[in-house]
Each structure stands twice: as structure tokens, then as C-alpha cells.
Image (cartoon, rainbow, N blue to C red):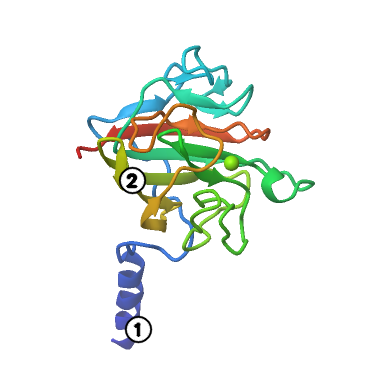
Amino acid sequence: MRSTCLVLALAMAHAAPALADDPIPNDRMLGLRPPEGATVLLGDSMTSWAKADGQATAEWPVVDGVATVAKGSIQTKDKFGDFRLHVEFNVPYLPDQKGQGRGNSGVYLQGIYELQILDSHGLKPQDNDCGAIYKQIVPAVNACKPPLQWQTYDITFRAARLEGDKVVAKARLTVVQNGLTIIDDKEISPTPGGVGGVKEGGPGPIMLQDHGNAVQFRNIWINPLSR
Ligand code: MG
């Protein structure tokens, strides 16, 4: 009887549903398909993406749905207000590089807020590491996987609110990285290096940064949210 109970208890523990936030980075958002109404931004081509001029189609190579950073930053041809965005990324292993030279890229939300991409596995979170809003928000936990592994960002973005030309409410952001909430409904301000000509409040494109490292992307989709 006792051993039966033990087996049952073990079976139940094994079958228990995942907690809302598992304590370690995980794969539960990997391969997430776009919901109805979402737009696929990166499937098997770059047709949704433009070069820095916002016009000519981006030239990042795409092989089997995987795009690799090359020839400059790119931005979506479309612009967005409030949205839910799914991004999968993979940073290269660059053991000879340090700090900001190690697998650097970034996802610029509405073209003006950089959610950093970097090889930050195992580090104490800082405001310029992977998962940070660059030089502004430190991720709550380090949810980074080692380089050469696919990682996920699941982003909920609410644009700044304006009255006339005046910002009356900052943009708000929630980010889940590899299944862990790293930024929970925080106010954000624009960061350096984004798309020119976009004002707080938007609308603005999604920009992927070329910082000189061969970071890879796949399965990117966006679902506009009603205000
Ligand atoms: Mg960056």
C-alpha cells in the first residue's frame, strides 16, 4: 500500500501542470504558432522586411525559415501600435568576444525601444544584457539560454498615449523570455539607435538590429491588440 501511494504520488507530481513561471528557462513557447488574426513577419522569406530606408526589401539570407543578420539593420514595412509579438532568436558562440561584442542584436519595438539580444547566459542581470530595455530596464531574472540554442521572446507592448502632441502615458511592456517573465508591465522610454522619424506613441515598425554579429531569427509573428 505504502509503495502504491509513493508511485501514485510520483506519477501525480510528474503529471502536474507546469507552473505559470517555471523556475528555469524552458522551451514551452518555442515553435508557438500565430493565433488567428496575427501576421507572420518571418516565415520563409524577407518580404515583410525592408532595409534601413524602409522601402527596399531586406537582404538577410533566409534558409529553411532561419534568417541571419547581415548587411545592416532591417525594419518591417508595416507599422504597428499596440501588439503581441513572438520572436525566436539564436546567438552565436563567440568565446573570444566580451560584453556587448558577444552575440549582439536587438528587437526595436515600434522602432524606438530596444529589447536587447546578447549572449548573457549565466550573468547577473544588468541594464545592457539580453532581456534588458537597453540602459533602462534590468530583466527581473536571467532567463538566457547558452549560445547556439533557440530562445523565445513573447512581448506585449502598449504604445505611449498622447493628448495632442503630448505624451500623457508612457509605453508599457511585458516580456516573457524562454517562458519566464522578465519584464512585467513596466513603463519604457525610447532608447538610442532606433528608426528615425518615429515619435513616442507611434505607430512604428519592428526593427531587428545588425550589431555585427551573426545572430539568427525565425518564427516571428505579430498580432495587433485593440486599444
Ligand atoms: Mg543590441
Q: Quadrant of residue 210?
A: top right
**Numbered label attached to residue 156:** 2
Q: Residues within 10 Å of mark 1 (few under 14, many from 20)?
A: few
**Numbered label attached to residue 3:** 1
Q: Quadrant of residue 18?
A: bottom left
- The reply, left or right, for residue 49 in relation to residue 223 is right
What kind of residue is marked 1?
A: Ser
Dot 1 lies on which element? helix
**Front-most of 95 and 155?**
155
Ligand 1 occupies quarter:
top right
In the rendered structure, which disc, 2 or 1, sits on the residue that comes first in sequence?
1
Q: Quadrant of residue 117?
A: top right
Dot 2 lies on which element? strand
Contact, mark 2 vs mark 1 (Cβ under 8 Å)? no
**Front-most of 14 and 170?**
170
Quarter occupied by the N terminus: bottom left
**Front-most of 209 and 33?**
209
- The reply, left or right, for residue 86 in relation to residue 83 is right
**Numbered label attached to residue 61:** none
Q: Residue at x 46, y 55 (%)?
A: 26
Find out if the beta carbon at label 1 lies less than 8 Å from the nearest ligand 1 atom: no
Q: Is residue 169 visible?
A: yes
